[in-house]
Amino acid sequence: RHSEVSVSELSIEFDPGSVPPTLSRLYIYKKKQMVENEGKEFSGLQLDFTMNWVGGPDFVLKPKLKGTGPGGMSISVQNLGVSGFSLSGTASVILAPLIDEEPCFGASQCFFLDQPEVEIKLAGIDHAWIKRLIHLVVMRVTTAVLAENFVLPHRLVVKARKDVPLETMITIKSPLPVALLEVEVLAARDLIGLDPTLVGKPTSDPFVTIRVGDCETRTSTQPHTVNPTWSDGPDYLPVFNLAQVVKVQVFDDDVLTEDDFIGKLSKYSVFKLCQECSGPEGAWLPLTALKGKKAGEIRIRTRFLRVEPIRDTPEKFQ
């Protein structure tokens, strides 16, 4: 979004190396799914776990970049490398449908419940400004690739048997969410002021983003206030697992530069957020800034709307 930076060419060489991720907090349970338009159910096994992956000595991530910077300055990076890489998040594997013959399941699904945390340390470039720019581009590309392919509702599906019916594969690749999260941001108070003023205390132009998996909604911007109120009405986000984290962040809206981070909610799952915020007035929840600093409070109201498949079509719609 930088108005003076343009990237014309970007390529990335990637090799995960030989060090595998470590898995912890493994939960295994049986899962049933309805085949749409068929009225049939099939069973599967779901494995939820925390995955941590730290790249080993043979991990390779080499981006090459060409573009222009401020004042038309040419940017060309060819020998950039990565000195450190880590990834952590909550992942799931679903083996379904279960069958009586080897390999005992028809297909596998792999996905992250939420956007995983990624850390990348760059090496091979000395210019601090260009290094920050390249780091920003590499992080955005990495998180975008993960989100668009492996974060719910997206998933990697591998067919294990050729005889799995087409209708079942469609249901596996594009399942219905279990529910919709109706979420409405009502107000915030005592936010951090990030924009200096000629008279009085600093203020901000706050807006709020809410993300579940790879789906996100955004409020309007409220100008020049640290105690904003919103009347945007509710938004709806699909929920595929009650353990999915609802990521709520508040930013200061800036036109020419990156939006400044004000604060966020600590980790609230869909289940926990609905428990606390489903009343008619919603609930005030604390915001934290960087390093755990208090950043004010936000008032949110939620409803949990369960999704049911349409089994029978009424005659008047046929």
Image (cartoon, rainbow, N blue to C red):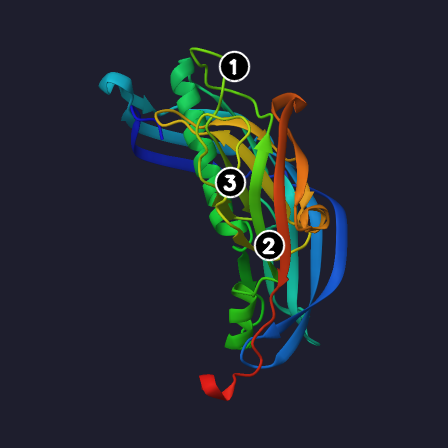
Residue 216 position (above or below residue 306): above
Which of the 4 image quadrants contains residue 310?
bottom right
In which quadrant of the rendered image does the C terminus lie?
bottom left
Q: Are marks 3 and 2 in contact (CB under 8 Å)?
A: no
Residue 72, image x, y percentages = 23, 20
Most foreground residue, 149 or 179: 179
Residue at 58% over, 33% down: 188
Q: Residues within 10 Å of mark 1 (few under 14, many from 20)?
A: few
Residue 307 position (above or below residue 279): below
Q: Secondary structure at mark 2?
A: strand
From the viewer's perspective, is 81 left or right of 263? left
Disc 1 from disc 3: Cα separation: 22 Å
Q: Which residue is mark 1?
A: 201
Most foreground residue, 85 or 89: 89
From the viewer's perspective, is 256 left or right of 202? left
Residue 266 makes an appearance in the image: no
Disc 3 from disc 2: Cα separation: 18 Å
Residue 183 position (above or below residue 7): below
Q: Are marks 1 and 3 in contact (CB under 8 Å)?
A: no
Residue 245, image x, y percentages = 64, 45
Q: Secondary structure at mark 1?
A: loop
Residue at 49% over, 26% down: 225
| Residue farthest along the top direction in this orientation | 198
